[in-house]
Image: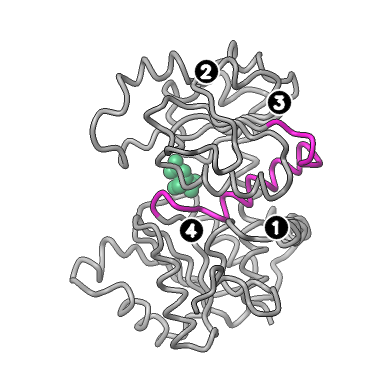
Amino acid sequence: MPLRHPQLRADGKLAHLLTIEGLPAAMIHRILDVAASFIGVAERDVKKVPLLRGKSVFNLFFENSTRTRTTFEIAAKRLSADVVNLNINTSSANKGESLLDTVDNLAAMHADLFVVRHSQSGAPFLIAEHLNRNYQGRIQVVNAGDGAHGHPTQGLLDMYTIRHFKKSFTELRVAIVGDVLHSRVARSDIHALTTLGVPEVRVIAPETLVPSGVEQLGVHFTTDMKKGLKDVDVVIMLRLQNERMNGALLPSAQEYFKHYGLTREKLALAKPDAIVMHPGPMNRGIEIDSAVADGAQAVILNQVSFGIAVRMAVMSLLVAP
Ligand code: NCD
């Protein structure tokens, strides 16, 4: 019978990182603790560490990315790995090679870890199952974003950021605002927040941009931005994913900004020390006003920096002997 979580080994250790759903809270805290131990290395106050010396990390990106690919690359280099970047939409996939043939060819080049981004949900699972079957678990996979399904390292770096600024999860109110329907970040964040015991996770969005039955994920849903932001500790803004929308889900960008764009006035409804997060890339003036994006409560660039340490933690837990 296939394991429900092919990412966990029989001894409970991580074999791959494919999704946050089903990861035990203790495992999430362990990853965050290891990340904390790497902060000095990630931020270059301390020399690189040799944990992945002699290992090859292949960044396999079937979809565009700047921040995520770059931070994986920096993280792998800080661990002393060799890094190969492949932008597949411009190479073999165009020639008709199948996903698993591409993977087999790179495995033949002695890859130790694949970091996979793909527009199809489930692609990293498919690769992980193939590697488990054919390479005796010697090659690991990290999901760097698959379709609208998940983006576990973004979820983990978001948790790192929240823990850094708020210390604990168990008394927080967190609002996730915007295009939840198309957002893999929202799904990973919701799984992580509920697993870590955040008592109140609110989703704020127009009806057309939430998956039906979103409450089943353990969140409260409202279309009312003002009600939703009241007294929250953390605001996670999402990008409007125009590239994943087909058809008219929204009247106009201006209309969206009027109701759901985060302005200073709306942010004033949250707690005075609330932090504002965004996974990037931001659409200024559509989901977030520049005054907020560049304001004192924004921790958006901290998220990017913490992402390096978190990705170092994940890769070292998967690959280091
Ligand atoms: C996110 C992604 O690609 O899923 N960005 C990222 O990884 N930094 C969010 C987004 O594209 O909106």
Label 2 – label 4 distance at C-alpha? 32 Å
- Could you say where residue 318 lies in the image, as x and y percent from the top left? 62, 73
Q: Secondary structure at mark 4?
A: strand
Q: Mark 4 to mark 1: distance in Å?
A: 17 Å
- The residue wearing badge 3 is 274
First in sequence: mark 4 or mark 1?
1
- Say if disc 4 is inside 8 Å of ligand 1: yes
Task: Check disc 2 and report the residue beneath it.
Answer: 224
Chain part drawn in magenta: 147-173
| Residue 28: assigned label | 1
Q: Earlier in the sequence, mark 3 or mark 1?
A: 1
Circle nearer the viewer, 4 or 1: 1
Q: Can you say whether 189 is above or below 239 in the image?
A: below
Residue 60, how many percent across, how many down? Answer: 41, 66
- Whether the residue carrying mark 2 lies under 8 Å from ligand 1 is answered with no
Which is more N-terminal, label 4 or label 2?
Answer: 4
- Residue sitting at 66 percent across and 18 percent down? 230
Closer to the camera, 132 or 78? 132
Which is closer to the viewer, label 2 or label 4?
Answer: 2
Could you say whether the residue bearing mark 2 is in a helix, strand or loop? loop
Q: Earlier in the sequence, mark 4 or mark 3?
A: 4
Distance in Å between CA atoms under marks 2 and 1: 31 Å
Which residue is depicted at the point 60% across and 62% down? 75
Q: Residue at 47% of width from left, 27% of height from top?
A: 205
Secondary structure under badge 3?
loop
Q: Which residue is mark 4?
A: 144
Whether residue 139 is situated above or below residue 266 in the rendered picture: below
Q: Marks 3 and 1: which is nearer the front? A: 1
